[in-house]
């Protein structure tokens, strides 16, 4: 096989894989919109006061969540980056964890800390204030800040780490005061990162499902995503579900376009950061302020984890672990997550190999460039078409031909697989790109193709990031509630679904125990990911 | 390299009657598996060039002097004062890096003014001093230009002007002109030499890292050769660069002869 044939095969396989992913993401809706009998009346839908209220609340909660997450993250990240103390790496690691924590577990922990009987409410009551009402906008905002403030902080720390070492040295040598350092060095770095970070967080909050489902507390605090789920699961109004889904897709497409324009980098938060050496002029006032900020931020993020552990340990863990339903749910979760991670990895790698083949084509051309950009976009499409929306589309489409719940496991595996694609591409892509930059010409010149190229060039470069990507994809799928919420049944129960059931039936102790088990597994997987990243420099971070 | 070896190899005499401009006495630095040991004495008004392969410790030595790295043991003295525990801002020196010597958001005038007014509260006297410093490096009328609007050579001139304005006795050059073409690099070094000669604020003592033996030959009084975290040979520039001082230096310079 010559190199040209090899390249064509790679490109062809990648295009086929991308088409498969796109077909899965949008297929359900295309079928439904084409069928006509369930097509929604958009004018009617947009004229509906309740739908307008949902749309308004979706934007309001996402906007406020983004604003709060970023505004809190800025002083915290600046203080953390400035400060040098034993344990700083631990705090940076702690700030990676919310991204790994299953959202349902996090929501439960937020209730434990911030709920009516939580630590904060009790403290407020003891000094004469009223207790916090966590259900509604307040709870949604707290939870979104818990999940996204650390992400924003890590993106900011990563941006500060990208400041040339000489700039920090100059600040130290010239004894620049804090405000001048902020103006000349920190703010320019922040200014480049904040729009992208804010757009990313806004996107995550617009499509937030589990938090709103658990903490929304009623019709007054419902988002489009949850409304789609309710339209199907409770009202069974397919036309409304389709209409709301389309509105959601339009909204997220607009946000994604804005995000792309602002230079979003979803993988940016994986880096541990904190590597820069700074030489700020010593100041006791600023030092104390930094200590206070770092302590408060760390407490805010650590408290829910502590709550998960304490509540979980108070549960009857030995009974839970030996309970048949829990074991079955754990095995189901394991099976779903391994299958989803494998599928996701397979499709993503095919697309990545095609992207690289196109990037190094001898005759680039407009068509090849278009295909390459399309392939790159396809891997991020799931950010626009969220898991609940994908699930809803196939739920309605499959209902016409088969037993929806019987098809559930396949749809959940496929949904979780496409959900992990943007992350896998950003973890593995840079390594593959580097390998091609280093040895691409040599590989071409010696005519290495097919399996030999895969084994001797691509595999050594991808092996380690692939393992990390697999672990991350498995962790994502393991904790996901989006797809399973629609397809879950008595015969198909995952751990997050079981946790939701126990919460719904007020078996609080069981829920706390399950949350601990789920959280532990997810965090262990994430720790593996982080450990791998700590040794890599070529991963987008 | 011990002090004794330094003397043997033709280094500056130890007891020359005045405090050295720079003294590294048993300075030991360790980071991971890297171990470095430095003993060095630079007289006031001397120009010392540091040469050696990549990773030999040349930039580390400068960072130790500037306070960007702390030694595990030993003492760093500048103009007679022990600065080992002092922060970079408290050390009487200026340092020029290979790049990023200017803040991109500030124009040339303000980049220079930072040298005397870190808060950029610029008095009339400061303004005159900054303008004079810019003029001294041939950049009259460049005050309002941003770094992005200047050439590489012009940017390094601005950095030189700031060093000139700071009036410190010692300047450390971590290859600030390495990215410039040969002619421009030679011009910049000539300018620095000229500014030193003219007096005023320009530091008199220079410690310069270089990969260009011809630069050392033209300007340096002495050359120190570093290998694996140690100064293994030091001596008058002419002797060192002719290959007569040490076989390792000759090998590094690629010189033919008996020593190789």
Image (cartoon, coloured by chain):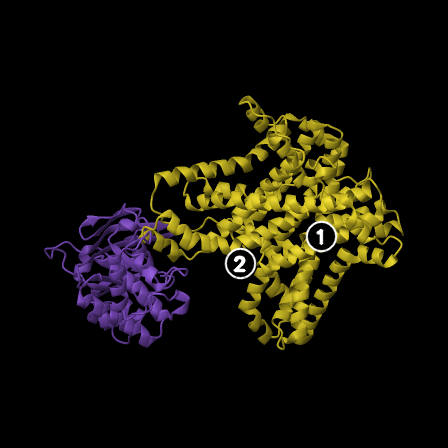
Front residue of this view, candidates B20 and A216: A216
The residue carrying pointer 2 sits among few (fewer than 14), some (14 to 19) or many (20 or more) residues within 10 Å by Cα, namely some
Looking at the picture, does residue B184 appear above or below residue B235? below
Q: State which chain disc 1 sits on.
A: A
Q: Is residue A198 above or below residue B198?
A: above
Indicate the chain coloured purple by its letter.
Answer: B
Tell me residue A84's x, y (percent).
Answer: 41, 43
- Work out whether residue A228 or residue A334 is closer to the camera in this orientation and state it: A228
Q: Which residue is mark 1?
A: A417
Disc 1 from disc 2: Cα separation: 24 Å
Front one among A458 and A249 = A249
Is residue A8 placed above or below B116 in the rendered structure? below
Classify mark 1: helix, strand or loop.
Answer: helix
> Alpha-carbon neighbours of circle 1 within 10 Å: few (<14), some, or many (≥20)?
many
Residue B125, horizontal then vertical, whole percent: 24, 57
Q: Spot the yellow chain and give its letter.
A: A
Q: Position of residue B132 (x, y in %)?
A: 24, 65
The residue under label 2 is A538
Residue at the image point whose x is 63% and y is 36% from the top: A138
The mark total stands at 2
User: How far across and down, in percent of the image, does residue B143 sit?
Assistant: 33, 65
Q: Secondary structure at mark 2?
A: loop
Say whether residue A407 is visible.
Answer: no
């Amino acid at each position: 096989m010559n190199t040209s044939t090899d390249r064509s095969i790679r490109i062809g396989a990648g295009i086929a894989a991308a088409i498969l992913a796109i077909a899965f993401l949008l297929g359900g809706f295309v079928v439904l919109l084409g069928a006509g009998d369930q097509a929604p009346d958009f004018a009617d839908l947009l004229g509906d006061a309740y739908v307008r209220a949902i749309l308004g609340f979706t934007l309001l909660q996402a906007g406020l969540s983004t604003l709060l997450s970023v505004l809190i993250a800025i002083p915290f990240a600046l203080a953390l980056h400035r400060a040098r103390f034993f344990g700083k790496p631990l705090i940076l690691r702690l700030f990676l964890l919310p991204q790994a924590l299953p959202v349902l577990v996090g929501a439960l922990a937020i209730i434990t800390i911030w709920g009516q009987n939580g630590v904060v409410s009790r403290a407020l009551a003891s000094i004469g204030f009223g207790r916090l009402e966590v259900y509604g906008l307040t709870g949604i905002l707290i939870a979104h800040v818990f999940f996204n403030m650390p992400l924003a902080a890590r993106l900011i720390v990563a941006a500060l780490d990208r400041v040339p070492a000489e700039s920090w040295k100059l600040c130290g040598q010239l004894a620049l005061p804090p405000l001048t350092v902020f103006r000349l060095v920190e703010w320019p770095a922040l200014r480049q990162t904040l729009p992208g970070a804010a757009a990313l967080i806004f996107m995550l909050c617009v499509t937030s499902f589990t938090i709103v489902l658990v903490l929304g507390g009623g019709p007054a605090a419902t988002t489009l995503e949850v409304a789609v789920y309710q339209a199907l699961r409770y009202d069974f109004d397919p036309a409304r579900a389709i209409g709301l889904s389309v509105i959601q897709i339009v909204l997220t497409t607009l946000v994604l376009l804005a995000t792309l324009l602002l230079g979003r980098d979803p993988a940016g938060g994986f880096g541990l950061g904190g590597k820069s050496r700074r030489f700020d002029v010593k100041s006791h006032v600023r030092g104390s302020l930094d200590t206070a900020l770092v302590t408060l931020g760390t407490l805010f993020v650590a408290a829910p984890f502590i709550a998960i552990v304490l509540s979980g340990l108070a549960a009857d863990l030995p009974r839970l672990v030996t309970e048949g339903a829990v074991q079955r749910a754990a095995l189901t979760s394991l099976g779903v997550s391994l299958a989803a991670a494998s599928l996701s990895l397979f499709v993503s790698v095919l697309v990545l190999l095609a992207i690289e083949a196109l990037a190094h084509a001898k005759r680039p051309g407009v068509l090849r460039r278009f295909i390459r950009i399309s392939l790159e976009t396809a891997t991020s499409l799931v950010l626009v078409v969220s898991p609940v929306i994908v699930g809803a589309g196939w739920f309605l489409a499959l209902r016409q031909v088969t037993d929806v719940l019987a098809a559930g496991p396949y749809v959940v595996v496929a949904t979780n697989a496409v959900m992990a694609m943007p992350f896998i591409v950003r973890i593995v892509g840079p390594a593959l790109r580097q390998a091609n930059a280093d040895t691409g010409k040599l590989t071409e010149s010696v005519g290495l193709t097919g399996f030999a190229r895969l084994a001797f060039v691509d595999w050594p470069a991808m092996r380690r990031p692939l393992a990390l990507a697999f672990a991350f994809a498995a962790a994502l799928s393991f904790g996901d509630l989006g797809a399973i919420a629609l397809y879950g049944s008595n015969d198909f129960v995952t751990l997050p679904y079981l946790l939701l059931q126990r919460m719904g039936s007020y078996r609080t102790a069981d829920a706390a125990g399950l949350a601990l088990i789920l959280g532990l597994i997810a965090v262990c997987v994430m720790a593996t990911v982080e450990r791998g990243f700590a040794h890599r420099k070529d991963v987008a971070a | 390299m011990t002090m004794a070896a330094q003397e043997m190899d033709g280094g500056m005499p130890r007891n020359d009657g005045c405090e050295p401009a720079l003294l590294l006495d048993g300075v030991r630095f360790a980071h991971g598996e890297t171990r470095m040991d430095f003993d060095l004495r630079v007289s006031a008004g001397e120009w010392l060039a540091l040469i050696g392969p990549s990773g030999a410790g040349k930039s580390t030595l400068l960072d130790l002097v500037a306070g960007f790295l702390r030694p595990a043991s030993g003492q760093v003295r500048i103009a007679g004062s022990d600065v080992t525990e002092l922060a970079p801002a408290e050390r009487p020196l200026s340092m020029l890096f290979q790049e990023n010597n200017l803040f991109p958001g500030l124009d040339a005038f303000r980049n220079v003014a930072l040298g005397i007014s870190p808060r950029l509260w610029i008095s009339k006297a400061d303004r005159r001093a900054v303008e004079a410093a810019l003029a001294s490096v041939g950049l009259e009328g460049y005050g309002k230009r941003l770094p992005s609007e200047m050439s590489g050579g012009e940017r390094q001139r601005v950095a030189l002007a700031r060093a000139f304005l700071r009036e410190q006795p010692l300047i450390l050059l971590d290859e600030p002109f390495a990215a410039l073409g040969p002619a421009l690099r030679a011009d910049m070094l000539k300018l620095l030499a000229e500014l030193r000669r003219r007096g005023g604020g320009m530091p008199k003592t220079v410690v310069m890292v270089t990969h260009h033996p011809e630069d050392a030959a033209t300007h340096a009084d002495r050359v120190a050769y570093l290998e694996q975290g140690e100064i293994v040979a030091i001596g008058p520039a002419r002797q060192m660069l002719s290959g007569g001082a040490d076989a390792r230096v000759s090998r590094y310079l690629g010189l033919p002869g008996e020593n190789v």
